[in-house]
Structure formats: C-alpha cells, structure tokens
Amino acid sequence: MSWLHTASSFLAISQLVFLACLYSVYFPRRLISRLIVLFSICITAYILVRSDVDWPQAVRLLLTILATLAPAVLWVIARYLFEDQRRVHPGVAAMIIFYMVIRTIGLLSYGGSVPRDSTFLYLLYFYIPQWIMLFLACHVVYMACRGREGDLVESRRQVRVPFAIGMGTIVGVIIGSGFFQFGGPQLDTLYFIVIFGLILFVNLAMFRLQNDAPQLIQTAVEQPRIAASTLPTGTVSRHDQQLIDRVLTAMRQERLYAEPGLTIGDLAAKVSLQEYRLRRLINQAMHFRNFNQFLNQYRIEEAARRLRDPEEEHIPISSIALDVGYVSLSSFNKAFKETHGVTPSVWRIQTDAQHFASGGQGE
C-alpha cells in the first residue's frame, strides 16, 4: 500500500502545482492569483506533513502551520471572488488572527502534538482553533452559494458551485482529519485521492471557463462604485437599447424595485425577456455585477429623495425603507451607507440643517 500512498500524494500535489502555475502564468501580479498560490502551498504542506517522510521537527512544524492557514486563505479567496463589498469585518479579521496565533503557540509549545495534560490547554490550543477553522470553511460554502441567484457575472456565477464543492470539501477533509485525529496510511491515501479528485474537478471547471476567466479575475480585482443615478453607458445596439428602455420603464414607472423579494426571474417575466438575456443585458450593457446592486440603485435613489423632502419629514425612516422594497431596517441602513457614506438618519439630519441654513439666509 505504500506505493499507492506515495502515488496518491504525488497526484494531488501535481494538481495543486497545476492550479498555482495556471494563475501565476495567466494572471501575474494579481492579488487573487497570489492567494491561490498560497492556498495551493498550504494544501501541499498538509499532504507532505502526512506523508511517510521523516521530516525534521522544524520542517514538520512549518508544514503544520501552513496547513492550518488553509481555511483562512480560502476564506479570503472566496471573499475576493464572490463578494462585491470586500471589506472584512474587524471581528472576522480578529478571529482569524486569534486562531492562527493560538494554534501556532500550541504547536510550538507542544512540538506539534496535541496537549493532553490539561483540558484547558487542549481546548485553547487545539479545539477552539479547529472550530474556528470549521466555521471559516462553512462560511466559504455559504458565500459561494448565497449570491448565485443574483450574480450577473456569468463566469463567476458558473464557478460558484464547483468552487464551493471542491475547495470547501478539501478544507473539510483537513479539519476533519485533525478534529477526529484519524490517521494511518490507508486513511491518508483516501484523503490524498479525495484532494486529487476535487482539485482536478476545480481545474476542469476553470478550464471550461478559460475564455471567461479574465472577466472573473477582473471582477475580483476591480470594484468600481456605481452611483445611484447611473445610466447605461457605452455603445449598445439598437435592439439592446430597446430592451434597456423596456427594463427602465418597468423599474421607474411601475416601481417594480419596491416589491420585496423581487428576483431577476420575476423581472424577466415582467418585461417578457429570457432570464439569461436579462442577466447579460444588465451586466454587460448597464454595468452591474449583481442584481441587488441594480435594485439598490432605484431603492436608495427614491429613499434619499424622500428623506430630503420636508413634507415627508414626519414619516419614520423604517416606513420609507419598507415602502421602497427593503424587508428590514438593518439591510436598508447598510445599503444606504454604502451608497452615501452616512446612515439614513444622519442624511435626514444633514438635509434638515441645510434647509434651515438656506431658509435663514433668505430671511
């Protein structure tokens, strides 16, 4: 069985090397490419540390630390690929730093083994970091699947499920093997075969999208801000312009954006257009990356106007939020602040102050 163990490890590493080289060659000096290379190194380190090689203690510790880093690196990759708002919450950043520091201290203190002499130290150095790693892996799958329905970048939309299945399962294997401390040549061989198959699955999926890969990488790199008053720009065909006018009429005159839970499928049915054509139209002709971003343009535009209107200053902000299509005040506050840089309440106060100042000057 030793030959199968060695062969499976080499096969898995070969796919990881291919993945790293693919992004390094075709997308040099891109942050997302460097992250994918780092992730490949982390998974390779996991394979090497579980191989039959009798590594020096220092090398084994380094490989173990790199393997532990894999869930955090994968989480950052998923954030850059699938989230248009890439700012990392301070709490998540602190959690990642905490688990890496604690896990590293535990490995250095106990020479890479699990502390057994103290329940507290076992929980601190091993069990808690494992749960954080599991949370990050689950959140990767959540991020990849959550926005698929409203994603207007077709290359990114197609890669979400393969990414979630492949990468998430790989990290799950790493966490599971550490969590339950399952080992041995037979199980390690199975881990390596699973990693090989999943990375091959991801590579094949990316190869199928090779013509659209630059768009996917560009989406992950550039995040231009779209103003609330954005109109279609660029050269479009006469037929596309007619379709755009049909969509804009439905949104502005019929206020479809005010319908809570409106999906792109609902809008496609309203304007009598195939869903895939509507996705492509909004993305390529109107320059939106996801459907929520498209809806927020109209919702925030109306909300801002009504918050400026002195005749509506008696209407609660929550009522305005619900009236323009939001299902909760928190989601409205978040979207409004992302667009205008301040919360709706601050926006209304600032507007009232401007009205008062202009009225005072006129007297």
Image: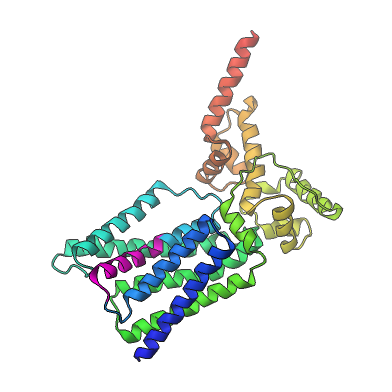
Instruction: Give the image location of residue 86, x and y in percent.
Output: 51, 50
Q: Is residue 208 above or below residue 310?
A: below
Colour scheme in use: rainbow
Q: Is residue 34 left or right of residue 128?
A: right
Residue occupying image coordinates x 55% and y 25% = 350
Q: Is residue 204 above or below residue 136?
A: below
- Residue at the spot 52% in from the left edge and 34% down from the top edge: 342
- Quadrant in the picture for residue 230: top right
Q: Quadrant of the N terminus?
A: bottom left
Residue 297 visible in the snapshot? yes
Is residue 71 found inside the magenta-colored segment of the image?
yes
Instruction: Name the residue furthest top.
Output: 363
**Residue 159 on image: x %, y %:** 58, 67
Q: In which quadrant is the C terminus drawn?
A: top right
* Residue 343 on image: x %, y %: 52, 35
| Bounds of the magenta segment | 55-72
Q: Nearer the viewer, residue 244 or 298?
A: 244
Q: Name the residue: 64% across, 53% down.
A: 289
